Amino acid sequence: MAHSSGSSGHGSIFTNSRDTPLYSSNWVPSSAGGYAGTCIFLIVLASVLRCLVAFKTVLEQRWLAQARCRRYVVVKGRGTEAGKIESDPAAKAGALITTNGVEENVKIVQSNNEGAIPFRLSIDIPRASLVTVITGVAYLLMLAVMTMNVGYFSSVLAGTFVGELAVGRYAQWEDH
């Protein structure tokens, strides 16, 4: 029977061929050792992806904690913001040492951002860079799986398992 799709016969079936190219025509394992090395590379790459996701989660938690712990100090009787913060029940009374000496009538207010934290270059540029790297690694793994090679597919799954086993507890975040 002839193929009606006009394809070369490869279609969507898995293969276990050792000479499946990965990422370019220059990366074609020619021996069992080369194929094993390629599979080990994919295991490591998938583990790195899980590590990057866990690292991003840890950074997100740290950035959120920094945003919530950002303190605003107001000296009583100065400006209209003082009146707003003075009536804040979450404000804590305290003393502040300034260039003018000890200020007794201050309140230290901790921000309780419930929504998104404000845009900050020191946070948003590293976040965008990290997400770009994560996306690039994920697409490289996707391309490896799309070769329909059973060894490559199994290696990506094994690397995901190893990476999750190693750092999965860091990637858990109740706010997700």
Image (tube, rainbow, N blue to C red):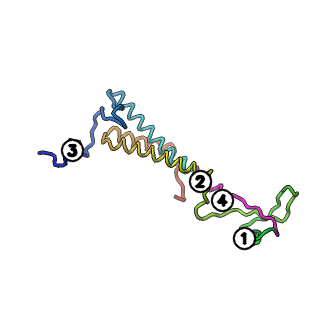
Mark 1 to mark 2 CA distance (whole Å) = 26 Å
Q: Tell me the residue that label 4 is attached to.
A: 68
Dot in front, 3 or 4: 3
* Boundaries of the magenta span: 59-77
Q: Tell me the residue that label 3 is attached to.
A: 7
Mark 3 to mark 2 CA distance (whole Å) = 49 Å
- Residue 136 placement (x, y as % from top left): 45, 45
Q: Tell me the residue that label 1 is attached to.
A: 89
Discs 1, 2 touching: Cβ within 8 Å: no
Q: Tell me the residue that label 2 is attached to.
A: 61
- Residue 174 placement (x, y as % from top left): 54, 58
Dot in front, 3 or 2: 3
Secondary element at image label 4: helix
Q: Residues within 10 Å of mark 1 (few under 14, many from 20)?
A: few
Residue closest to the eye, 87 or 32: 87
Quarter the N terminus occupies: top left
Mark 4 to mark 1 CA distance (whole Å) = 16 Å
Q: Residue furthest left?
A: 1
Mark 3 to mark 1 CA distance (whole Å) = 70 Å
Callout 1, which amino acid? Pro
Q: Residues within 10 Å of mark 4 (few under 14, many from 20)?
A: some
